[in-house]
Every structure is written in structure tokens, then in C-alpha cells.
Image (spheres, grey):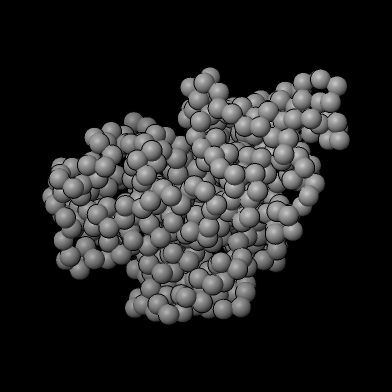
Amino acid sequence: MDRMATQLAGFVLAAGDLSPAALHACKRRLIDSVGCALGALRAPLCGRLRAMARRYPGRPDAAVWGTTIRAAPEMAGFVNGVAIRYLDHNDTYVARSPGHPSDVIAGILATAEAEGAPGLETLTAIAVGYDLYCGFLDAAASHTKGIDQASAAALGVAAGAGCLLHLPQAAMADALSLAMASNVHLNAVRHGELSDWKGCAGPNGARGGVFAALLARDGVTGPSDSFDGPGSLSTILGPMQWQLPNRLEGPRKVEQSDIKTFPVCYHGLSAVEAAFRLRGRLALPALRAIEVETYRLAVTRMADSPSRWAPGTRETADHSIPYVVAVALRDGALTSDSYAPERLADASVHDIMRKVHVRASDAMDAAYPAAAPARLTAVMEGGERLTSEVHFPKGHARNPVSDAELEAKFHDLTRRNLPAARAKAVLDLLWRFETLPGIAPLAETIGRLSDD
């Protein structure tokens, strides 16, 4: 087995107990992720995938949230993971590459349920999953080489699931190697007119991570050179600069992700907040143009093609700076309802979008990824110029969401699908998750929310 697989496996097995801060951070990300999933449960895509899950029974199995369906853990994790990801409201980690580390959570939870793992062990596995997911994003600008963040999900889940399966170091190295060799995903999923797969890619990587860990437990060996050798990941990405946390000296990666306050691509959060701040200072009928300055990756992801000025899907709309800025200016809010089909076709939104101009700024590019800056300048009919600038949107590590704000987000996400009393019961359970002798009560407390 190559040096990096062995080193990563050793890190996973030595990661140790969670500090109080890391434990709290894990529960916050769990609350955020479950809230996102419950808010999306009635989305048509999620319904289609639940129907698929019926065809994938397992022994042991895990719950598909909000239903009576049980499926093999890799499939249950995939379906629940798509629900977490669907609204584009789950957390983000930005380094040499960006991604959504909570993509690891559903696969690890499904493995924990299938294996009868207690809550604290499950949270520890989630922290390990975050460490390797975010470590992958730290190690290389993989998106510039055409490799998607879903590959990081496969690696993180293989590590977290491997912990729950109690893999020894050699088998853990095999699990990581198997996950990496079979899950090199294309970043094409983030470009052009975005499809259903935008919300499925990360959960599909997680599905591959669960499968890799299960294979390794049953003695299947992985390629000896998945990371370092000929034909390996380094052949595509070059030397990778892993920055794994030292649990004795610094925070775990789960403490460092940004929790979103709006359902929009991370790279548009600052532009949306800046639009909110401008809205009360201008009269839309007198608006001549909106100039948006931001960093290059934001332009690449959210203003890189004609589809971003005429989004035909919610997946494209939540990755469109012109669209989310226009909605924020017109409505003073941005919610999941902002992406309904009738809103995508709204002529008044399109009128504002035609006035939006987006460009990259060298200064803002230099500030990224430590900051996520955007400056909006409204040019009025009389020539007046009104400016609003945001560098650290709400939820950024420099501008964090409080526990009370996180709970408010959870209740806002779940209010359509859960009675208030049941939502509170789920939230209370998640805050004491480390005390659970097994995690089956999570699905039981969620209960049945929709037709199976």
C-alpha cells in the first residue's frame, strides 16, 4: 500500500476523542444537515429516489428518513444525503478547492444505524469524515483539474464508516484506496445548465465510500498505488499537500465549515447580503444597472455561461448571481420558494437580471478563500451610484451563526413537513445525540412525513 494511504489510515485510527468544542461543532452540523433534509423531503427528486430505494434492501439495513422504507446502508445514505444537499443550504468548506463536507453525514449515519453504533461513536466518525473530506480540499485545487468534490465525500465516508466497522489499519488503508480508485468524479456537474446530478454527486461519492468500507471489512484489498504511484491521484493532481489536524494542538475540520443562511451556492452569499443592504436605498424603477465585483471562482461558478442569465432549473438558479441578486433586490428575501418554476419564469425578475453585470476583481480574488467578498454598485437613472460590500457573509467563520440562529434555521426548514412539536423533539434529540445508545431513535422521531 502506498505511503499516503497508510498515513491517512494511521491518522484516522489515531484521531481520538472529540474535544468539547469539536463535539458541539459536530452536533451543530448534524442539526443543520437534518434540517436541510427534512425541508427537502417532498421535492420530486427526493421522491423518485425513495422509490428507487425500495429496490435495494439490505441485511443489515438503515432507514430512509420520513418513510417506512429501509434499504442497504449505502443506498439509504445516498437517498438521505440527496435530501440534505437538495436545497443547497448545507454547510461549505473552502480551501484550495471548495465543497460541502456535510455530504459525509448521511452515509456515516446509515452505517452507524446498520451497525448499531452509539451516538458518540457516530459523531466521532463524522468528525473523522470531515477531517479527510476537508483535508482533500486542502491538499489540491482539484476542481481546476476537472475533479469534483464528490471524490472527497468518498474518501471521508470511507474513513468514517471504516471507524464504525472497526477496521484495523491495513483494512482501513484498503478502504481509503478502494474509495479513491473508484470515485474520481467529474467537476462537469458544476458547470453549464445544472441538472439533478448537482445535488446527487456528493451523496453518490458518499455511497461509494460506504461500499468501499464494507468491501474492506470483507477482506477485499485496494490498489497499492491509489494516491502516490503510477496512474494514481497524484498523476492527475500532482503532489498533494495534506493538512490534517492535530487533535492536541488545533481545531478539527468540523469546527471550520461555514453554515449557510440562505439556500444558494456559497459563492453568491455575499452578493445576496449586499443586495439586501442596497434594497432599502434605491427605487427599482430607477435602477439602470447593477455592477457585481467578486472573486474569480464565484464568476466561474455563478456567471460563467448564458444559462446563468436564463436559468431553466432550480439547480442553475441557485448557482446564478444575476438571478439571486435580482430576487434579493425585488423581494428582500431568498428562500427555497424563490426557485419555484413560476419564479424562474417571472418577467419582473428577468427585467432586473438584464441589468446585472458581473466581473472578477483582482483585489477580491486575492482575498479569497480567507474571505468571500462581493461588492454591488447600483447605477441609477440620474447617475447616482450606491455601493454595498460584504466580505464575510453570515455563517462564515468570521461571522458565525449562533446556536439560537441555527435552531431558527432548523425550524424554518422543517415547518412545512413536521408539526412544531415533532420538530422540537427531533432538535432536542440531536442536541443530546452523544448520549444515545444507538441512533435508530433519529428516524423514529422524524417519523413518516410523506407517501413511501
Q: Position of residue 16 (x, y in %)?
A: 30, 45
Residue 349 seen in the figure = yes
* Image-quadrant location for residue 285: top right
Relative horizontal placement of residue 412, taking residue 216 as reference (left or right): right
| In front of the other: 82 or 326 | 326
Percent position of residue 309, x then y: 65, 44
Q: Quadrant of residue 18?
A: top left
Q: Position of residue 3 (x, y in %)?
A: 15, 42
Which residue is painted at 50% across and 55% down in the image?
198
Q: Quadrant of residue 299?
A: top right
Residue 299 to residue 157: above or below = above
**181 or 209, nearer to the observer:** 181
Above or below 332: residue 195? below
In the displayed image of the protein, which residue is found farthest to the front? Answer: 306
Q: Is residue 314 left or right of residue 443?
A: right
Residue at x 41% of width, y 48% of height:
187
Q: Quadrant of the C terminus?
A: bottom right
Q: Is residue 258 above or below residue 216?
A: above
Is there any visible trace of residue 27 in the rendered image? no
Q: Residue at x 20, y 68 (%)?
A: 218
Name the residue rendered at 75%, 30% in the picture: 289
Labels in figure, total: 0
From the top left corner, tell me how far across and down residue 97 is, in percent.
Answer: 41, 38
Front position in the image: 128 or 425: 128
